[in-house]
Image (cartoon, helix red, strand yellow):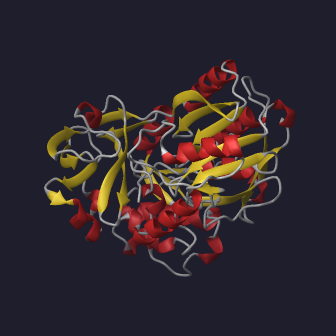
Amino acid sequence: MRRLLPGLFACLLLLSACGGSGSSTPAAATGNCSVAGQNAQILGIMQSWYYWYQYLPGSINPAAYSNTTDFLDALLYQPLDRFSFITTQAANTAFYSAGQYVGIGISEEVVNGNQLQLTQVYPASPAANAGMARGDFILSINGTAVATLIADGQLATAFGPAQPGVQVSLQFQPPGGSARTVTLTKTVVTQPNVSLVQTFNAGGRTVGYFLFQNFITPSFDELNQAFAQLQSAGANELIIDERYNGGGLLSVAQYLGSLIVGNGDAGQVFAKLNYNNQHTDQDQTLAFDNVSNALNLNRVVIITTNATASASELLINALKPYMDVVTVGSTTFGKPVGENGFDFCSNVLYPMTFDMTNAAGYGGYFNGLAPTCPAVDDLNQPLGSSNETSLATALYYIANGNCGPTAAFAARELARAATLRPWPQRYGWQNLVNAR
């Protein structure tokens, strides 16, 4: 299982709102900032804007809950809503404006049910400076074995609070190497958005590739640079690696879709947002834009995992009516709904406020989007390497038009891994891609 930045990722925003309503955000809540007062504000927002407001408890006392998270949990429509959450305004602004968070600079995944393996180590982070790398196993956190933390359900909090100066002691081991123990101090980490931009040759085609991690404000410029580079290299095929992308700004998804399909489809429907029957005035249709550096493709290949969520899934679904969309990897997370942000006191409430459909009217993929070609996330190979299994499968498909000889094995391995992966509980969708 992978985790997102606490309370931040895999949400879907439009401009200043998470899955918002054009250029405006619904009015923020105001009032009493005691716990009971905050809970009352949450209830008022949910009664008006929540996509499943009809299923709210008929009678609930905001003053009976000692914190806002437990109160929100009590309101959610189960089992569909694994998504609504609360975060702080400060953390929200830091991530979406600059891709920054407080941590040690790693993301990781639970493998084999009781092991923790690094999927990424971010450049210039405390973990990178300590020599940690993708594929390393974390054996213990602050002296407690990882297997114990997983079994006891304590992994989510084992790294401590997201505050600068907090120290974390980790014992880790590279595959085939010796175990080491390091003490890392949390600091502000900047997570890359668009990286590893490069081209490959497959079947006589020039294949552009990039790793895409976040749909946030800096992504606009980074995508422009990436597509200009790929256009200059003569790319006529494209692989987008979204395996760790939990979502973000809806406006970025719309922009990326426009870069992919080209200006011939400008003005056509990208996606439709549908609010509850109390706010149908907020319903809207988003269209592809005229953009520079578009590749004007007939096909795109997207690498996915169970951590590919929200805006990442929307991009896949939105492109399908217009082009051949091939997905390689594992089934996506399953979040076909979006949210608006409502400020209250020093926090932000992100309730699910709308669903999303493509131009053909398809949505509701709560069970995720299944891959065209099953492939494992090969943690023993660097990201962006043509030897890494998911990327190798994508290149094979472009060259040969089929998934290749490893797809059947990958499907069996992914099914086995799914039985060992702890299914996310409430807030679990934010915890699919951890950025510690």
Residue lying at 48% horizontally and 43% vertically, measured from the top left: 388
Asked whether residue 424 is in view, the answer is no
The residue located at (31%, 33%) in the rendering is: 125
Q: Outermost residue toward the front?
A: 405
The reply, left or right, for residue 166 in relation to residue 56 is left
Image position of 123 (left or right of 278): left
Q: Is residue 361 visible?
A: yes
Q: Position of residue 128 (x, y in %)?
A: 29, 33
Question: Residue 293 in the image: x percent, y percent?
Answer: 72, 23
Residue 49 at what x, y percent from top left?
63, 61
Q: In terms of image quadrants, where is residue 45?
A: bottom right
Q: Is residue 335 above or below residue 240?
A: below
Foreground pick, 377 / 347: 377
Q: Quadrant of residue 299?
A: top right
Give how far across and how far down residue 276 sits, in percent.
71, 64
Tell me: residue 180, above or below residue 334: above
Q: Residue farthest to the bottom?
A: 58
Residue toward you, 130 or 285: 130
